[in-house]
């Protein structure tokens, strides 16, 4: 069974919203994220890069985002 090499989704456990295969081993969700990341990095000024990363980490760690990620099942591991 093919899994996305980035997020490990598969045809049985697709992303939410459901994804398709952009390329073998890379789903459309992650392909879109990569494209956004590349575009963002090109736009970001080098001098502000560290501050942007800090802000992004604070954003990801915020309770609101954590609750949203949990609700969507992000990072949830398959457990029997
Ligand atoms: Zn993926
Ligand atoms: Zn996916």
Image (cartoon, rainbow, N blue to C red):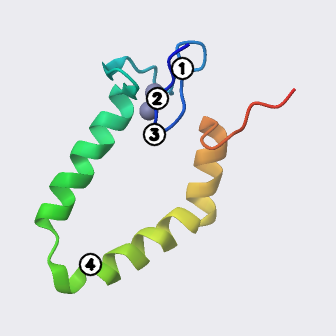
- Element on which disc 4 rests: helix
Neighbour tally class for label 4: few under 14, some 14-19, many 20 plus, Cα within 10 Å:
few
Residue marked by disc 4: 49
**Up/down of 66 relative to 33, above or below:** below
* Disc 3 within 8 angstroms of ligand 1 (CB): yes
- Element on which disc 3 rests: loop
- Element on which disc 1 rests: loop
Residue marked by disc 2: 4
Mark 4 and mark 3: span between their CA atoms? 23 Å
Percent across and percent down for residue 65 are 56, 56
Dot in front, 4 or 3: 3
**Residue lying at 38% horizontally and 26% vertically, measured from the top left:** 27
**Residue lying at 23% horizontally and 83% vertically, measured from the top left:** 48
Q: Which of these two is toward me, 48 or 66?
A: 48
Which of the two discs, 4 and 1, labels the residue nearer the N terminus? 1
Residue 10's mark?
1
Residue marked by disc 3: 6
* Disc 4 within 8 angstroms of ligand 1 (CB): no
Apparent side of residue 44 relative to residue 67 in the rendered image (left or right): left
Percent across and percent down for residue 57 are 48, 70
Residues at discs 2 and 1 in contact (Cβ within 8 Å):
yes
């Amino acid at each position: 069974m093919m899994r996305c090499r980035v997020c490990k989704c598969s045809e049985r456990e697709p992303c939410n919203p459901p994804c398709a295969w952009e390329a073998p081993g890379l789903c459309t969700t992650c392909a879109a994220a990569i494209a956004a990341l590349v575009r963002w990095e090109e736009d970001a000024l080098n001098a502000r890069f560290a501050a942007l990363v800090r802000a992004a980490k604070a954003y990801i760690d915020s309770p609101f985002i954590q609750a949203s990620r949990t609700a969507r099942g992000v990072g949830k591991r398959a457990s029997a």
